Image: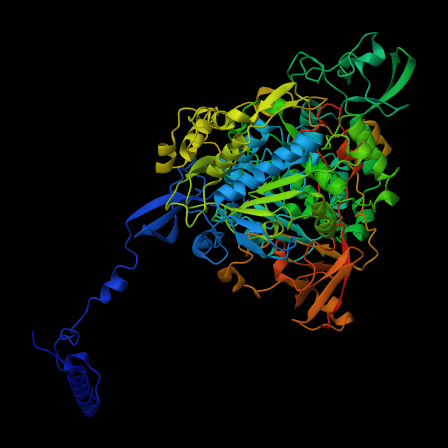
Amino acid sequence: MAKWSRRDFLKTAGATLAAVAAKDVLALDLLAPVADPLGAYPYRGWETLYRDQYSYDYVARSTHSVNCTGSCTWKIYVKDGIAFKEEQYADYPPINATLPTYNPRGCQKGANYLEYVYGPQRLKYPLIRTGARGEGKWRRASWDEALSYIASRITANIQTYGPDTITFYSAIPAKHFVTFAGGARLANLIGGVMCSFYDWYCDLPPGEPITWGEQTDSCEAADWVNSKYLILWGANLLETRIPDAHFMTEARARGTKIVAIFPEYNPVSTHSDLFVPVKPGTDAALGMAMANVIVNEGRYDAAYCKQFTDFPFLVRTDNNKFLREADVVSGGSTDKFYVWNTATNKAVLVPGTWGDSNKTLNLGSIDPALEGTWNVTTRAGSKQVTTVFAMLKAKLASYSPSAMAGVTGIDAGLIAQIAREFAGTKPGRIIEGAGTNHYFHNDLNNRVQILLVALTGNVGKPGGGFDHYVGQEKIWPEHGFINLAYPLTTAKQRFQNMTLWTYVHADTVSDVDSVLPRPLSQYITESVNNGWMPLYPEGTLTTGKTPKVLIIWGANYVNQSKGYEKVVNTLLPKLDLIVDVNFRMDTSAFHADVVLPAASFYEKWDLNSTDLHSYIHPFTPAIPPLHESKTDWQIWIALAQALQDTRYSYYDAKFGMQRDFSRLVADFTINNAIRDDKAACQYLLDHAEETAGVTMDQINTQPHRFTQTSEVWTSDIKPGVAYYGFQRMTEHKRPLNTLTGRQQFYVDHDWFLEMGEQLPVYKPPVDVDAYPLRWNTPHGRWSIHSTWRDAKFQLRLQRGRPIVYLSPGEAARRGLVDNDKVEVYNKNGSFVAHLNISPRLPDGMAQMYHGWERYFFQQGGWQTPTTIRIKPTQLVGGYGQLKFKLNYWGPTGNQKDTRVEIRKFIG
Ligand code: SF4
């Protein structure tokens, strides 16, 4: 081959150009032909670098377990043992031919998880703390040393203080069922305490258990397209539900009206038909005013309300209690209730209630009155009764749009317009975000919002209802998970509401007593003494006993803690041992005594689902666990082995059983049957009605839509139909899991009556902090909680450090300019951040997207201004649907009532 030098090439090219220029023409056919200028290059192998940069050896399927509610299935490309590229799979089977599909599905964080797999944040080997907690001083340890140390501290503390001092904490099974189940399984076998997370994060909407006896049985995102009127009430879908936001915009393209109710102007507001800038914390006032219009103008669905709500139930006017069979008949039930039958003009027992064996909402020949006042003969004489609906109507009278205009900041005419449109456009849906759920009175916010969809007959219909997506609980294979997580059954498990546990053990001092009928401490003591809420260790309130061990995995407990300063400075010092299982050094790991390195999401088998779609799909090990990391399942088996090696055994008096650690590994692995991660996944699939007969290899080929549904859901999964809640109620007349068997808006528990909350009402935020700015910490688009907060590509999309947003007016009043270093403070402490002046913020509010790790702050942290505030009504038990159940009913760790002030930081 003739050799060309670079000099030859330049010479020829220059001559050609000169010739063209000389003729002053640019016609290509006048260009002189030249030989391939690269043909003479001596070495061209380098070109394969570009040609083959996307070649790969194989593709594996995985997803991300970060509590995003995404559950998006991804391709991970691997070459020479290195995972180098992520791409959406886009193979969810369609539900039907008319609904948009879930393909492709993902967000920019998920497209960038590899930064963590190979990044400097990655934990490589076990670490044991050498400095003070949170100081960041560690030494490398072997697995044997770390596990032996943990096992010795666990057994020593059980021996000295009891098993209920050993505390396990993780979050959201659905984001990684097997990873979650591993820790829970060990807790179940050794007698430890398993804590809740959903109420503690305040993602649980407590109005749902109160009204429906259910939590978060929401429709999948495809059903949004079936809605004709969609209210986004604090649900910033475009920032926080990125994979599903297109269902909202596609619904809008098909004619659905989108109404966005937020205090601040945000990305989803720009894509709505109507933006309603409600004053923060006045959502229930707006909802009550809408209900006022719907009821007063007769725009409610009377037939629906008679059958599917407690509106016709009779209430005694002398004591505000439901009229019960026990009031009327000697030996009668306290769980059977009456309506006034207009067909016979007398009070009759209504079917389908808690105490009724006739489990149907079919009213038969009964035509209940919605309004009226009557006298009934009880065992204590004649008593006046009225209906729940009549009482509700009287309550709503004080919530006219004009009366609420000043409270909410929304014009009375606009309130009436939304109410009329919502009642008149079926089906209608409210999607609630964390925005209204993080207030002290979140239960009231939920109850008012549910009231609107019940009055209009929307619950239990395709395209209708009240749906809440903050957290991933249903749709899920519950029985498979419970079988895997609790081998000795849930009856032999110590469960703990995390809000109460943290509140008490952080020695929190109530600052809400001024808005309560009695001091909060009284309610807590009564609730615990009544057995309504558990509090471990047992005897804490009388003996001051404290927990001793805290094991955290799949969660960032310390960083996300309300009352952060008290948690770090009071609660953590009480603990003898803190263990964190993690793939990266987050704030919780930073405060731990022992850190165990976990496999990344691309290095293990696991399962993942969400309430935003109806499919299940796997994590698979695209690459083996890097460095010395192990999968979570293997870590729990290794810890079981270390505990077994202690040969410890003790009698667990609470459950009347001997807990023998000498066979812990066999018990954990069912004699090796579920020793490996994939087998554990298959075990879960085999034990869930929704996935029975489905194999891991099948769902690795394509995501599986849940098929048969269990009784834990409120609806059937039907082929060709997007999932929505409460279909069994409307179609099969199946009673709900409430005292009245219906959507229950009247709660006659003594504490609800004492609080004046027997019916939905509006109560303003608990503004006991005497500071001018409401502290708002919403979910953002550049992280999923604290995950990706420390990832460089996400940091580049923002200002790269914690920023607090303030309106131009509030900034000017404080003499602050953009990017100033500021101090945010209140009575709980202060932190330092940089200022972003944003006109989309209303006056009276300061905002920071949540999740920043503590080590980003020069001083304090984003949770520093918060405290823990427990609402007494959420401590109630022993009342129908209001009974403690993990992640279903218990006090929530609300934080949006927090108020702060901001000043320029010098230093
Ligand atoms: Fe989907 Fe969540 Fe992964 Fe984003 S982080 S791609 S929402 S699974």
Which residue is more in the foreground, 584 or 808? 584
Outermost residue on the right side: it is 381
Q: Count numbered badges in the picture.
A: 0
Quarter of the image where one finds residue 747: top right
The C terminus lies in which quarter of the figure? bottom right
- Residue 416 appears at what percent x and percent y? 73, 45
Outermost residue on the bottom side: it is 22
The N terminus lies in which quarter of the figure? bottom left
Colour scheme of the picture: rainbow
Which residue is more in the foreground, 404 or 549? 549
- Residue 698 appears at what percent x and percent y? 36, 32
Please give left or right for residue 833 compared with residue 378 in the image.
left
**Residue at (74%, 48%) from the top-left corner?**
570
- Residue 785 in sight from this viewpoint: no
- Residue 136 in sight from this viewpoint: yes
Which residue is more in the foreground, 872 or 845? 872
Which residue is more in the foreground, 254 or 484? 484
Quarter of the image where one finds residue 834: bottom right
- Looking at the image, residue 327 lies above or below residue 758: above
- Residue 615 appears at what percent x and percent y? 46, 35
Please give left or right for residue 490 compared with residue 418 in the image.
left
**Residue at (20%, 66%) from the top-left corner?**
45
- Residue 765 appears at what percent x and percent y? 79, 48
